[in-house]
Image (spheres, grey):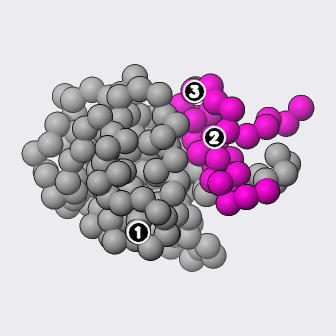
Amino acid sequence: MRYVIAITGASGSIYGVRLLQELKGEKILVMSATAKAILPEETDYTVEQVYAMADQVFEDDQMFASIASGSFSYDAMIVAPCSESSLAKFACGISDTLISRAVSVCLKEGRRLILLPRESPKSAIMLENELKLARLGVCILDANPGFYPKPKTVDDLVNIVVGRCLDQLGQEHSLYKRWE
């Protein structure tokens, strides 16, 4: 399995990092400039350490990268976290970065696309953008953990959200205790 993981400039870069750590298969990574700036503010990881978790890395301005073409095959794309600015671009079909172009490719090719927006509260515009994408088959997986597994740490909360993402991809995991 081959996956494209994009980390955009929303708070919650740890979701993208944990996904890179847990996702099984070939991982192609793109980080926005804002994501690179936020990462050291929120985590103990450097951009170089995150890059090392991926099998292939592209910069967000590499518009001729393989993932910008519909003829390049991959199984799914996950944007974690997904900033509301990025989500708005996706909903409007704006493809001015590699991340937004890869999302456009997912949509036109009918590939699996999972977005993890973290913003709260949400304006009506944000909700309309999410609805527009959901109607196109995009999985909008808000970064809202469940509490039935009785999380005790921030890592537990992150694991619940990332585990839900892995569930959407059909990947087995033990990141949280399932409801019995």
What are the residue bounds of the magenta stretch? 152-180
At mark 2, the secondary structure is helix
Dot 3 or dot 2, earlier in sequence: 2
Res. 171 mark: 3
Please state the horizontal and vertical placement of residue 84, each as a whole percent of the image. 45, 68
Q: Which residue extends farthest right?
A: 180
- Residue 60 lies, with reference to residue 165, above or below; the image says below
Let me know if residue 137 is in the magenta part: no
- Residue 97 lies, with reference to residue 85, above or below; the image says above
Whether residue 142 sits left or right of residue 29 in the image: it is right
Please state the horizontal and vertical placement of residue 78, each as a whole percent of the image. 44, 44
Residue annotated with mark 2: 163
Res. 62 mark: none
Gap between marks 2 and 1 measured at Cα: 23 Å
Whether residue 67 sits left or right of residue 150 in the image: it is left
Q: Which amino acid does the dot numbered 3 rest on? A: Gln
